[in-house]
Image (spheres, grey):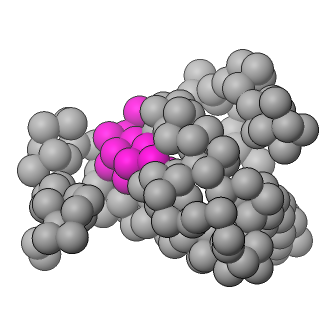
């Protein structure tokens, strides 16, 4: 197994830490703390995009493999779990099927960086709009459509 693949699997060995039962009040966030968190998140997304550029098929396989864990780590809200898990699996499937033997590393890096940032935004929106609905109510907002050239299209829709 290559070293980047081992780096991707490393977080799987770490147990999750939940702060739902914490008794202390949440700390006040400062603009510098928010900026630092944003920079750390963008750095992590850039690292993931870079690993995908190194080996798109292998990284895509790992993304599909760990997508249920990605959804589970998003907490108990079904909107976040569905959006995060399915979105992460979709990016992995794209990486596995779209790139052949000859591909541009820069193009893979750019496309994955955009896709991962889009997934973060989608999870944020799903969290704000999804509320605490149960899984069946959340599934009523999803539509899976076969495409003429092959493949499937997953739509998440809301009526306001």
Residue at 79%, 59% (x, y): give it.
54
Residue 30 appearing in the image: no
Question: Which quarter of the picture shows residue 29?
Answer: bottom right
Q: Is residue 21 left or right of residue 34?
A: left
Highlighted range, magenta: 73-89
* Position in image of residue 22 (x %, y %): 66, 26
Question: Can you say which quadrant of the picture contains the N terminus?
Answer: top right
Specify the quadrant of the image occupied by residue 148.
bottom left
Q: Which residue lies at the image location 74% right of the left edge and 64% below the top edge? A: 53
Who is closer to the viewer here, 61 or 36? 61
Residue 6 in view, yes or no = yes
- Image point (72%, 78%), residue name: 104
Left-right relation of 158 to 131: left
* Image quadrant in which the C terminus is located: bottom left
Q: Is residue 31 magenta?
A: no
Image coords of residue 5 (percent x, y): 78, 38
| Placement of 102 over or under 141, stated as above or below | below
| Point 22% across, 63% down: residue | 150
The total number of labels drawn is 0
Residue 84 colored in magenta in the image: yes
Q: Position of residue 60 (x, y in %)?
A: 58, 49
Secondary structure, magenta segment, majority class = helix
Q: Is residue 26 above or below residue 158?
A: above
Residue pushed farthest front?
101
């Amino acid at each position: 197994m290559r070293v980047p693949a081992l780096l991707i699997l490393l977080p799987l060995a770490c147990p999750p830490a939940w702060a739902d039962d914490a008794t202390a009040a949440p700390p006040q966030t400062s603009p510098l703390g928010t900026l630092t968190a944003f920079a750390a998140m963008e750095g992590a997304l850039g690292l993931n995009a870079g690993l995908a550029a190194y080996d798109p098929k292998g990284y895509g396989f790992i993304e599909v493999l760990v997508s249920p864990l990605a959804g589970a780590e998003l907490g108990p809200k079904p909107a976040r779990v569905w959006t995060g898990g399915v979105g992460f699996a979709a990016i992995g499937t794209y990486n596995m099927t779209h790139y052949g033997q000859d591909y541009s590393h820069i193009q893979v890096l750019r496309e994955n960086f955009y896709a991962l940032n889009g997934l973060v935004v989608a999870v944020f929106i799903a969290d704000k709009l999804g509320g605490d609905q149960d899984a069946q109510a959340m599934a009523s907002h999803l539509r899976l459509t076969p495409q003429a050239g092959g493949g499937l299209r997953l739509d998440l829709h809301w009526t306001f």
